[in-house]
Image (cartoon, rainbow, N blue to C red):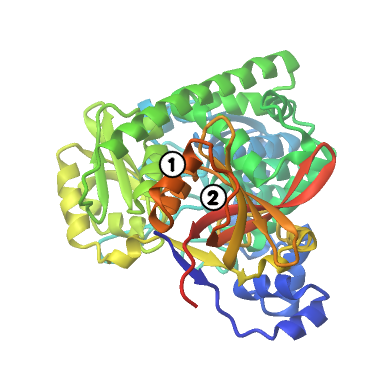
Amino acid sequence: MKRWILREHDADIALMTKVLKITPALAHVLAGRGIRSKNTAIKYLDPQLAYLHPMEGMAGVSEAVDIIKKAVSDGKKICIYGDYDVDGVSGTVILHKALTKLGANVDYYIPHREREGYGLNIPAVEELAKDFQVLIAIDNGIAGVSEVERAVELGLTVIIIDHHNPQFDENGAELLPPAHAIINPKQSGCPYPFKEMSAAGLAYKFAGHLGVATDEMLIFTTMATFCDVVDLVDENRILAKNGLHTLNVHGTENVGLHTLVKARNLEYNEIDDFAMGFIIGPCINASGRLDSAGIAVELFLTHDVGRAKELAQQLVDLNDKRKEMTTRYVDEIIGGLPDELDDVLVIYSEEIHESIAGIVAGRVKEHAHHPAIVFTKAGEVAKGSARSIEAYNVFEAMSANSDLFLRFGGHPMAAGATMEISNVDILRKRLNDASGLTAEDFQPILYGDMALTLEEAIFALAQDLQVLCPFGKANKEPTFFSYNVTTERAEVIGQSGQTLRLTFRCEEGRKIKAVAFKSVDKFAQHLSDNYSKEVAEAFTTGRLKNMTIKMDIAYNLRINTWQGNSSLQLHILDFKHPAPR
């Protein structure tokens, strides 16, 4: 069961309401997110591109500019070495278009996930050194010390544009590759004020610093910002909001992206964070998971409409295949979990396709609310992906056991690693012996921005909250708690048989519709536990729909538009029997 916690603050809501000219409810939401000063609030409510930090303050930028300018003027061949996820693909596309605008002789290389793995590898570097003079690693490279050493040895000039955490040696000293320029605000000594940008975001800002950034590049930055699940605050929020606005109002001149949008049956006036992260993004990721991410890069660089349609359909088909594989593996692993779980779930299965280990780990983590690392056999070694919970820094934990890995990298909430198969059991024991996790850490927390009565949950408030869009990591959709509310009707809708539609009755007689996805079984159990098994059975068989019961509910306020008519709808996140108050 989830713990419900209201965000606390001591802000002067009346003053915020007056100064910012916003509603008290919106002021509560802002205050609960730490937005307390007038200037911060203004930038949050109206995030303009003009508020982006000057890139002159980022380490490595001036050196990278000099390298690029000289390479262009000398006619040197530049290779962009990307990555196979949305961020790596987007960063590659942005840099390719930016350098092309500068007149550079530029091409790209995307490593194959299964054959080469993540990041720079020496065989690829040695091959590229035969044809290129400058190598730009985007969304990788910060951990490639030996690979960059080899590149430099072969005469390549190396630029790294990466957002991953640098690695450290056994004495705690930062290990940076000997590149000629490193653009990564997470490297020690970099004074840049915002550290959490995606690699595509860094590429876009670098393009802007070179004077060639375009709206097309901004849209790819937005896509990467959502799909790489970086914190949607500060510059990330500015880029994402402006990119979505540009895409929805003006569309895109990129033939490939336009074709993919249409192939996914999307309209430009409806593309939001969900469409980016769960409809468009997975198609791009699927290319790198099951085939080659070069398909996606080619799609976004082509000007041939016919070729774009072929490539877009390939991405859609690959994503359909990926979804089927993921469902099968997730069901198998979750079905095989023991009743008593380890603190950290370290799972090894030779059946799982290595390209979707991260997705499977994420689903297992969501199901069990335990950190999960899923390994599979890749040739003679084990490759795995980790997904974690808020209480557990999985990158830090893996760093403490770096002697077990052939290579690893990542973030506090997600990481990837390659190791000898025999070390998987050793890792499992070490991580669990030192986890430091408690039973409370495994209980999901649902944070609420404000408690409302149903009478306060009105259409106008839902409209006011739209200014907070888009939503994502560190900028979650506002959640409200309402206690001891009364239902009037409950029914099952949709083809899945697990979507619950509720009708609530306010004291003044107004009725509010609500939906709760994947909640029919839970609601039936709620009826059985708090009323009777007979009531639960009558509901599940469809014999009972009109019912007056009391509930505490956690929800988002949404605007539902159907055939041109808009109305308030609650999106139920959780519900429980009313607690004594």
Left or right of residue 233, residue 103 in this image: right
Nearer the observer, 554 or 234: 554
Q: Which residue lies at the image location 28% right of the left edge and 65% below the top edge?
A: 439
Left or right of residue 123, residue 274 in this image: right
Q: Nearer the viewer, mark 2 or mark 1?
A: 1
Q: Secondary structure at mark 1?
A: helix
Q: Which residue lies at the image location 70% right of the left edge and 39% below the top edge?
A: 98
Check disc 2: other Cα within 10 Å, few if <14, some if 14-19, many if 20+: some
Left or right of residue 331, residue 236 in this image: right
In this picture, is 264 found above or below 394? above
Res. 175 visible in picture = yes
Res. 145 visible in picture = no
Residue 294, percent from left and from top:
54, 25
Sequence order check, earlier mark of 2 and 1? 2
Amino acid residing under circle 2: Val
Q: Quadrant of the N terminus?
A: bottom left
Q: Which residue lies at the image location 37% right of the left edge and 64% below the top edge?
A: 391
Check disc 1: other Cα within 10 Å, few if <14, some if 14-19, many if 20+: some
Nearer the observer, 193 or 187: 193
**Residue marked by disc 1:** 537
Residue 409, percent from left and from top:
37, 49
Residue 480, percent from left and from top:
61, 65
Query: Which quadrant of the structure image shows residue 75?
Result: top right
**Residue marked by disc 2:** 229
Real-space Cα separation, disc 2 to disc 1, in angstroms: 41 Å
In this picture, is 32 found above or below 231? below
Q: Secondary structure at mark 2?
A: loop
Query: Which quadrant of the structure image shows residue 106?
Result: top right
Amino acid residing under circle 1: Glu
Q: Which residue lies at the image location 75% right of the left edge and 68% below the top edge?
A: 43
Residue 422, percent from left and from top:
14, 39
